[in-house]
Image: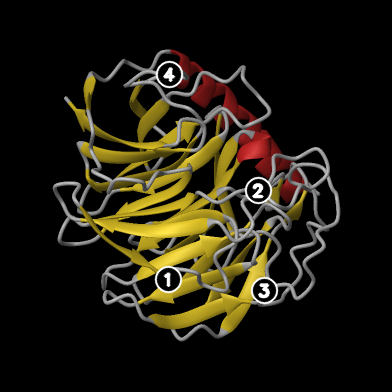
């Protein structure tokens, strides 16, 4: 009990200090490039759930573009069978579509590119994570698509949340890797946990359950891993980022970040973390800014706000930060990708 009390007290103190730091965060000046992506005639983006770049600067966009045919209770409809993965070159010119009419493309959740330029698509409704090689061929599938087409009604973010040790998912949201190639899946919208696999896709363990204490989540909307293998989990419902070691042992909590729906960690000797305080689809009272911080939670600055104009954001679900000062931001609410240049 004493150790638990100490952890809780440290978390509360960290939250108070972080809240003061975020309130005083300096504004970072930035520009947004108009028409960053050139789509072919007759092709449009829907809700942009994921955006990522590879080592050549090519841009990958995973978007919900189909007509909704499944509605879950009071939740926004899912674009059942209508998610598509597009590739653009570094100038924004359309190149191709990957995985067209894929059995697992039901409701896009995120796209990431690993250090070997493999493209990973996280699909929330098919409960799968698909690994494509740079040529667009399927290399690995994690999870399994539910056989039934009938989706039961439940409240947003609701599920059993048990964090059960299984290789099956309930509405996964993000994926990341450590230096050894271990795979960390944020199984965080239906469940409330992090699932760890080895580089070959063998399930190793999972941690987390629904709650508000250390090692508990309201949901896990985003995940990132640093060079030391520490795992950063965006716990949106609890308005914090929890940090764990590589085996899931709780280390610390970064609080007062609002709803960390999207996170991106830069590479190199001095990495920084970009965190979007995104306004969820059912909450319009969130400021919508993006924070830049050190990995210890020290805030370096913030930029942007909620809105529909350029340099404003409508529910940011993904950030690509391969370059620290050139970001690609995918928005659910505004059906677009913005390319940002930070000064």
Q: Nearer the viewer, residue 291 or 96?
A: 96
First along the sequence among labels 1 and 2: 2
C-alpha separation, residue under disc 3 versus residue under disc 1: 16 Å
**Label 1: element kind:** loop
* Residue at image mark 4: 305
Q: Earlier in the sequence, mark 3 or mark 2?
A: 2
Q: As drawn, is 14 to the left or to the right of 150?
A: left
Disc nearer the start of the sequence (3/1): 1
Query: What residue appears at the point 70 percent right and 52 percent down from the top-left corner?
Result: 69
In this view, the residue in front, 269 or 58, is 58
Going from N to C along the chain, the mark reached first, 3 or 4, is: 3
How far apart in space, not on screen, are marks 4 and 2 (Cα)?
A: 29 Å
Residue under label 1: 99
Query: Could you tell whether 197 is left or right of 313 in the image?
Result: right
Decide which of 38, 287 is in the foreground and name it.
38
**Alpha carbon separation for disc pair 3 and 2:** 18 Å
Q: Quadrant of residue 302?
A: top left
**First reached walking from the N terminus: tag 1 or tag 4:** 1
Which label is found at residue 145? 3
Q: CA distance from mark 1 to mark 4?
A: 34 Å
> Residue at (70%, 39%) from the top-left corner?
76
Residue 341, image quadrant: top left
Tag 4 secondary structure: loop
**Residue 63 position within the rendered picture, expressed as x and y whole percent measured from the top left:** 46, 50
Question: Which class describes the residues within 10 Å of circle 2: few (<14), some (14-19), or many (20+)?
Answer: some
Q: Which residue is mark 2?
A: 68
């Amino acid at each position: 009990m004493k150790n638990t009390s100490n952890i809780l007290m440290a978390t509360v103190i960290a939250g108070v200090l972080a809240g003061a730091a975020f309130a005083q965060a300096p504004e970072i000046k930035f520009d947004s490039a108009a028409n960053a992506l050139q789509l072919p005639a007759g092709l449009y983006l829907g809700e942009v759930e994921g955006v990522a770049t590879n080592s050549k600067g090519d841009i990958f966009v995973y978007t919900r573009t189909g007509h909704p045919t499944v509605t879950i209770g009071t939740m926004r409809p899912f674009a059942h069978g209508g998610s598509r993965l597009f590739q653009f070159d570094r100038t924004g010119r359309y190149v191709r579509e990957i995985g067209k009419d894929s059995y697992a493309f039901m409701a896009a959740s995120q796209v990431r590119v690993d250090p070997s330029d493999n493209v990973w698509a996280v699909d929330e409704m098919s409960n799968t994570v698909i690994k494509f090689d740079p040529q667009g061929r399927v290399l690995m599938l994690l999870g399994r698509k539910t056989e039934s087409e009938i989706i039961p009604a439940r409240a947003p973010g609701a599920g059993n949340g048990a964090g059960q040790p299984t290789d099956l998912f309930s509405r996964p949201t993000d994926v990341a890797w450590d230096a050894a190639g271990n795979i960390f899946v944020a199984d965080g919208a239906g469940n409330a946990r992090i699932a760890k696999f080895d580089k070959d896709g063998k399930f190793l363990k999972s941690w987390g359950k629904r709650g508000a204490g250390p090692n508990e989540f309201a949901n896990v909307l985003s995940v990132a891993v640093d060079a030391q293998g520490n795992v950063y989990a965006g716990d949106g419902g609890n308005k914090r980022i929890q940090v764990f070691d590589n085996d899931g042992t709780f280390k610390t909590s970064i609080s007062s970040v609002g709803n960390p729906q999207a996170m991106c960690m830069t590479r190199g000797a001095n990495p920084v973390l970009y965190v979007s305080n995104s306004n969820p689809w059912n909450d319009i009272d969130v400021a919508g800014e993006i924070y830049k911080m050190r990995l210890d939670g020290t805030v370096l600055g913030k930029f942007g706000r909620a809105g529909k104009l350029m340099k404003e954001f409508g529910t940011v679900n993904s950030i690509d930060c391969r370059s620290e000062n050139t970001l690609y931001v995918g928005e659910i609410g505004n059906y677009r990708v913005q390319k940002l240049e930070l000064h």
